[in-house]
Image: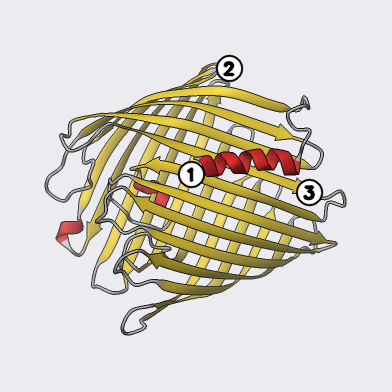
Amino acid sequence: MKKIVYIFLSALALLGTDALAAKNYSLHPTIDTSVRWDSNYYYDHEDEVDVYTYLIQPGLTFQYQGAQTQVEFGATLDGHVYSGSSTLDDFIGYTLDADANRTTKSRQVTFGLRDTLSYTRDPEHLGDLENITSRELYKTNVLNPYLKYELARFGIDLEYNNRVVSYDEADNEDNMLQKGSIQALYKPNRTFEFGPAFEFESMNYDQDSADYQSAKLSAVLTRNGKFVNLSGGIGYHQRELDDDENTELDTFSWRIGIASQSTGFKKTSFSFLLLRDLNDTSTPDGYYSSLQLNGAIERKLWRHFALGLNASYKWDDYELMERKDDIWKIGASADYDVMDWMKISLETGYQKQDSNEDENDNENFSWMLKISYIL
């Protein structure tokens, strides 16, 4: 927590010393209260345990927008109370987000720093392509400095990511993933850009699991239209494990994304994503190639009420074992803005994992009722 507070204060000092004195900033306390029910909290094949999670989340959001400087900071405490399982201890977690960037007067260079620190037992935070069902408590910190340079129709994007995962229980392996990337993009017009991209990854575990290094070379493109934004890429991803056999894994990776423009449709927003890649694994020896399809749509029925639907399919083919998993998820949501400072949300979902190994089959029904306040 001290680390991200230091980043936030440094951002104010170095990127915009006049931020707090200016009028173009906002500071809002928030509080969310919710109750969630899971029919199979531990994603177990046989011993299903239904659990109620009661959550209270006081928080604070800060935003500053200047001529050349932008700062965003958010912090929440997550108080968890459980019923239904004798093995779950109540705990207080947290989530801290900071993002600060500055653009030079010439508008050619933008540099910034993002950082996210959390203490949770939610496995969803460990990677978009992961299939983690552990409910152990862990801390994770993702540090992301970045630099963008634009000159006429050419641009270069540089990024570095450092993700550290640390578990409370000693029998879970802590790990650190480092990822660097560079994109060189050509823009023939205001809405279209394309070019090569290169990524390098290095994973280190603190116990017995094999570390690895990965390299991926891709061609990427984006097209920002009046109604939808399109993005895509195709490349080759190779990974080498530091085990006794120096095992090599590889796959052709690709990505196709479609998302509605915020100004294109007045009441409807949607997104679609299809991708294939090696997972950036947070689980020891859980290496696989994954094919994933995600879709979501939201419709505002009237000014204060919106309905949403989302669905996904994920196919995981494990490289070091015979295991193969199919995972389906579907969900629905309803949001009602009671007042400018109060919102009520209801979410429901279903997840099913079908594996060629019976012990990895599971399904889970869930619902959540949430009330949010912006003070």
Q: In this orientation, does residue 267 appear?
A: yes
- Residues at badges 1 and 2 in contact (C-beta under 8 Å)? no
Q: Which of marks 1 and 3 is nearer the N terminus?
A: 3
Residue 334: quarter of image: top left
Give the numbered dot on residue 92: none
66 or 327: nearer the eye? 66
Mark 1 to mark 2 CA distance (whole Å): 29 Å
Q: In this orientation, does residue 263 appear?
A: no
**Disc 1 residue crowd, few under 14, some 14–19, many 20+, Cα 10 Å:** many
Q: Look at mark 1 in the image and give the residue it sits on.
A: 117
State the quadrant of the C terminus: top right
Q: Look at mark 3 in the image and give the residue it sits on.
A: 103
Which of discs 1 and 3 lies nearer the camera? The answer is: 1
Q: Please, what is the three-letter code of the amino acid marked with disc 3?
A: Thr
Q: Please, what is the three-letter code of the amino acid marked with disc 1?
A: Leu
Which of discs 2 and 3 lies nearer the camera? The answer is: 3
Which residue: 48% across, 56% down? Answer: 163
The secondary element bearing badge 2 is classed as: loop
- Compared with 17, 252 (above or below) is below
Q: Please, what is the three-letter code of the amino acid marked with disc 2?
A: Asp
**Disc 2 residue crowd, few under 14, some 14–19, many 20+, Cα 10 Å:** few
Horizontally, is 318 left or right of 310 in the view?
left
Residue 188: percent from left, percent from top: 80, 64
The secondary element bearing badge 1 is classed as: strand
Q: Earlier in the sequence, mark 2 or mark 3?
A: 3
Residue 267: percent from left, percent from top: 59, 32
Which residue: 59% across, 60% down? Answer: 160
Q: Look at mark 2 in the image and give the residue it sits on.
A: 340
